[in-house]
Amino acid sequence: MLKRSKILFMDEATASVDSQTDAVVQKIIREDFADRTIVSIAHRIPTVMDCDRVLVIDAGFAKEFDKPSRLLERPALFGALVKEYSNRSA
C-alpha cells in the first residue's frame, strides 16, 4: 500500500475487525486506491458486494465468476450466500 503499487492484494484484510470498522476500511480502500487493481480474499458479503467481479470458490474449485449483480440474477452459490447472510443479519 505504501509503495502505491498498481495491484493491491489483500487476504482477509479486515477479518479480525467488527463490521463497522470493515465498512470504514473498505471505503478508504475504494477511495484511495480507485485507480488500482485490488484482489481481495474476503468472506463478508458486504465487503464484496460492490466489487467489479466476484470469484466464488467451492471445495477448491472456481464455481462462479461475474459481477455481483449478475451472480444474483441466477440461482447459484453466490445468491445462496447473500440470502444466508441476509437471514442471519435480520
Image (cartoon, grey):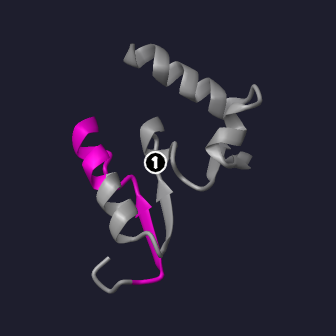
Tell me: residue 75, above or below residue 6.
above
Q: Where in the figure is residue 59, as x and y percent of width and height?
A: 66, 40
Tell me: residue 38, above or below residue 7.
above
Q: Which residue is depicted at the point 64% across and 34% down?
A: 78
Residue that mark 1 sits on:
42
Q: Quadrant of residue 79?
A: top right
SS for dot 1: loop
Q: Where in the figure is residue 13, as x and y percent of width and height?
A: 34, 56
Q: Dot 1: within a 10 Å radius of its alpha carbon, few (fewer than 14), some, or many (20 or more) residues?
A: some
Q: In this picture, which residue range is highlighted in magenta?
A: 5-25
Q: Quadrant of residue 63?
A: top right
Q: Where in the figure is residue 62, as x and y percent of width and height?
A: 72, 49
Q: Which residue is depicted at the point 44% across and 69% down?
A: 34
Tell me: residue 7, above or below residue 10.
below
Q: Which residue is depicted at the point 47% across and 24% down?
A: 85
Q: Looking at the image, how many numbered discs can be counted on the residues?
A: 1
Residue 41 showing in the rendered view: yes
Q: Where in the figure is residue 17, as x and y percent of width and height?
A: 23, 43
Q: What residue type is disc 1 on?
A: Ala
What quarter of the picture does the N terminus occupy? bottom left
Tell me: residue 19, above or below residue 28.
above
Asked whether residue 10 is drawn in magenta, I would say yes
29 horizontally vs 65: left or right: left
Q: Which residue is depicted at the point 49% across and 66% down?
A: 38
What quarter of the picture does the C terminus occupy? top left
Residue 18 showing in the rendered view: no
87 horizontally vs 89: left or right: right
The foreground one among 50 and 41 is 50
